[in-house]
Image (cartoon, helix red, strand yellow):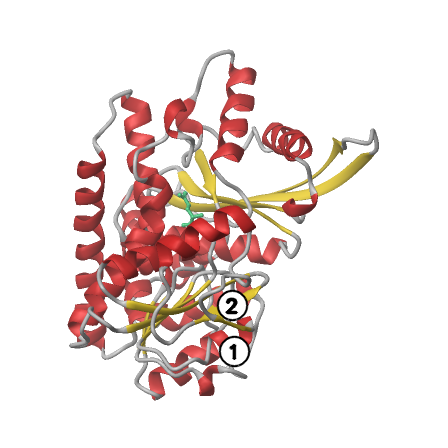
Amino acid sequence: MASGTTNPWHMALEQFNNAVQYLELDPGIIDFIRLPKRELTVNFPVKMDDGSVNVYTGYRVHHNTVRGPTKGGIRYHQDVTLDEVRALAMWMTWKCSLVNIPYGGAKGGIIVDPRLLSMSELENMTRRFTSEISLFIGPDSDIPAPDVGTNPQTMAWLMDTYSMHAGYTVNAVVTGKPVPIGGSLGRADATGVGVMFAARQAMQKLGMPLEGSRVVVQGFGNVGSVSARSMHEIGSRVTAVSDVYGGIYNEDGLDIPALMEHVRKSGKVTDYPKGEEISNADLLTIPCDVLIPAALENQIHQDNVGRIDTKLIVEGANGPTTPEADRMLRERGIVAVPDILANAGGVTVSYFEWVQGLQSFFWSEKEIFERLERIMTTAFEDCWSMAERKNVDMRTAASILAIARVAEATELRGIYP
Ligand code: GLU
C-alpha cells in the first residue's frame, strides 16, 4: 500500500514490510526484529557563553543487538525527532548486517542547530550529552560515530568525557575520532569513497562509461564532497553540487578539488565563480547519468520523482528516497543503489577503527581501502544477484539479505529464557 509518508520511521517500516514478505519467518520473530530494542530520551542543561542555561533534548536508540554491540552515529540538527532516530537506528541494523560486520544498529541525536553554537558551547553540550547517555554506550555495548552536524572533534570530546568517568582512556567507545587519538586512517573519506565504489560497480553493470558520465551530487558535507571528489577522480564529470545554502551548476564539469578548497575558505558552494547558481530543488531534476543524494531524508518524493532525469541513483544519505518515489523510479527503469549499501563504507571503516583500537594495532591506509573495497564489492554483488533472482529492486534485495541474517542470528541464539 502506498502511504506517501515522509515520516522516516514510517518509511523504514514500509521498506521492512516490503522486504520481509519475501522471507519465510515466524511472525513473532518479524515483530521482534522490526521494533527498536530500547530508546532513551534525555533533557539536559548546558551553560552558554553568556552565562545563561539552555535545555536540550537528545536521543539514543538501540534498534537491534542480536549480531553484536550496536553501532551508529550521533546527529546534531534542528529537525531531529525520535522517529527519525528510530529509523536511522533501524537502517544501521540492516547496513551492518548487509556488509556483514558484527554489529546491531543504533543512532543518536540532539535537537539543535550546531551552526548557532560557539565551539565551547558545542563542547559543553557534547560532554553533558555523553554523560547523560553513558549508561547506554560503551566499547562492548554501543559505539557512536559522526553523522550530520558532528565531526571528529565531537567524537574526541565524547571519548574524553567517557574516559574521564572510567578513569582511563577508552578509545574504542567511539569511532570517527581524529587520527592522533586512535582514529583510523581513511575513516574521514570512507563513506564518500564507498559511494564511489558502489556507483562504479553499478555503472559497470549498466554498461555506462565512467569517463565523462554526468554526475550530480546533493550535499557537500563529509559524504557529498568526498563522493564528488572520488567520482571526479575516476573521470566522471560532476556537473552540479549543492549544500544547505544552494547549488552550483556547470555542464562542462566542476573542478571539484578547486571547489573543495573554495568551500574551505568561504564556507559555501554558491559563490564559487565557475558555475551558475541553482536551487537545491532544481539540482535534483538536472539531466544527468548518476544522481547522488548525500544530504538528508525525503529528498526524492512523489512530487519531484517524475522530473528526476537520470539513469542511476546512488544514495550517499540515509533515507533520501520515499517508498512511494522508489516505486515510481522502478516503473521508470531508474536503478537506485540503496543507502544501506551505498553509504556503508563509513560504518565499515568505523568497524576497522574499533578493531584497531581494541587491539592497539593500527593498519596502513592501503590495507584499509583494500579491505573496504572487498567488503563493498561483495555486498554489491550479493544484492545485484538477489535483485535478479527475486525480480525486485536493489533496496528490497539489500533489505532481504540484511533481514535474513538478523533473523538467522535470532533463531540460532534462541529466545531467552
Ligand atoms: N553515521 C554514519 C552512518 O549513517 C556512520 C555510522 C558509524 O560509523 O557508526 O552510516
Whether residue 410 is visible: no
Q: Quadrant of residue 334?
A: bottom left
Q: Which mark is residue 282?
A: 1
Kindly identify the amino acid type of the residue bearing the numbered disc 1.
Answer: Asp
Percent from the top left, x then y, of residue 395?
A: 33, 69
Report the residue at 26% width, 73% height from top. Answer: 213
Q: Is mark 1 on a helix, strand or loop?
A: helix
The residue that mark 2 highlights is 247
The x, y position of residue 73, in whole percent, is 47, 44
Q: Residues within 10 Å of mark 1 (few under 14, many from 20)?
A: few
For marks 2 and 1 on the same chain, the one whose residue lies earlier in the sequence = 2
| SS label for mark 2 | strand
Q: For the C terminus, give its image quadrant.
A: top left
Left or right of residue 410: residue 38: right
- In this orientation, which residue lies closer to the viewer: 314 or 227? 227
Q: Please give the count of numbered marks on the rendered protein.
A: 2
Q: Are marks 2 and 1 in contact (CB under 8 Å)?
A: yes
Question: Relative to the observer, which residue lies in front, 143 or 16?
Answer: 143
- As shown in the figure, which amino acid type bears the numbered disc 2? Gly
- Residue 234: which quarter of the image? bottom left
